[in-house]
Image (spheres, rainbow, N blue to C red):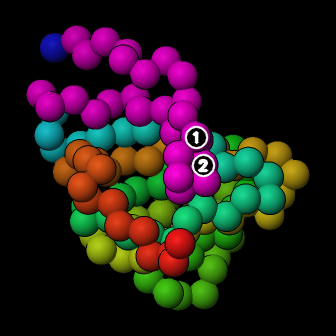
Amino acid sequence: MLIPDKNPEEMLTGERCYIRELLNDERVPEASVAECRVPAGVTTELHRLAVAEWYIVREGEGLMEVAGAAPFAVGPGDVVAIPPKASQRIANPGTADLKFLCLCLPAFSPECYESLESD
């Protein structure tokens, strides 16, 4: 099965990061994959997903917070497992972009996202 690239450009999200979906297709409901980029000095929105999520850090340094635990440092090669419904956010305290892949199991849909920040 070939799944053509439908999203060649990254998009700025309300989560305060840039995302480009690599795989999110109804023919593959088991998983989705996205490239994520957090600019220097930015912390993503505190949120939770109804699905399991895995961050695979490719470039840069970050501080990851999962389920209200103390933030911990992440860098290239690190993989972070985020259980379904766990609060989460990632900060980029560095001077370069933080880039990671985001794998969701099952596939991400907007309905599974919940902001935990007040407007």
Q: What residue appears at the point 87 percent right and 51 percent down from the top-left corner?
A: 95
Q: Is residue 69 left or right of residue 21?
A: right
Mark 2 closeness class: few <14, some 14–19, many ≥20 residues within 10 Å? many
Q: What residue appears at the point 66 percent right and 49 percent down from the top-left corner?
A: 38
Disc 2 to disc 1, C-alpha distance? 6 Å
Q: Nearer the viewer, residue 48 or 55?
A: 48
Residue 71, image quadrant: bottom right
Q: Please give the label number shown on residue 41.
A: none
Q: What residue appears at the point 53 percent right and 72 percent down from the top-left corner?
A: 119
Residue 43 in the image: x percent, y percent? 67, 64
Residue 89 in the image: x percent, y percent? 55, 68
Is residue 23 shown in magenta? yes
- Residue topped by disc 2: 17
**Residue kind at label 1, given as amino acid type:** Leu
Q: Main secondary structure of the magenta part?
A: loop
Res 58 visible: no
Q: Residue furthest right?
A: 95
Q: Check contact, mark 2 vs mark 1: CB within 8 A.
A: yes
Q: Which residues are magenta?
A: 2-27
SS state under label 2: loop
Q: Is residue 89 left or right of residue 24?
A: right
Quick check: 53 above or below 114? above
Circle nearer the N terminus (2, 1)? 1
Residue 70 in the image: x percent, y percent? 60, 87
SS state under label 1: strand
Residue 5, image quadrant: top left
**Residue kind at label 2, given as amino acid type:** Cys
- Residue topped by disc 1: 12
Q: Is residue 30 left or right of residue 36?
A: left
Quick check: 103 above or below 113? above
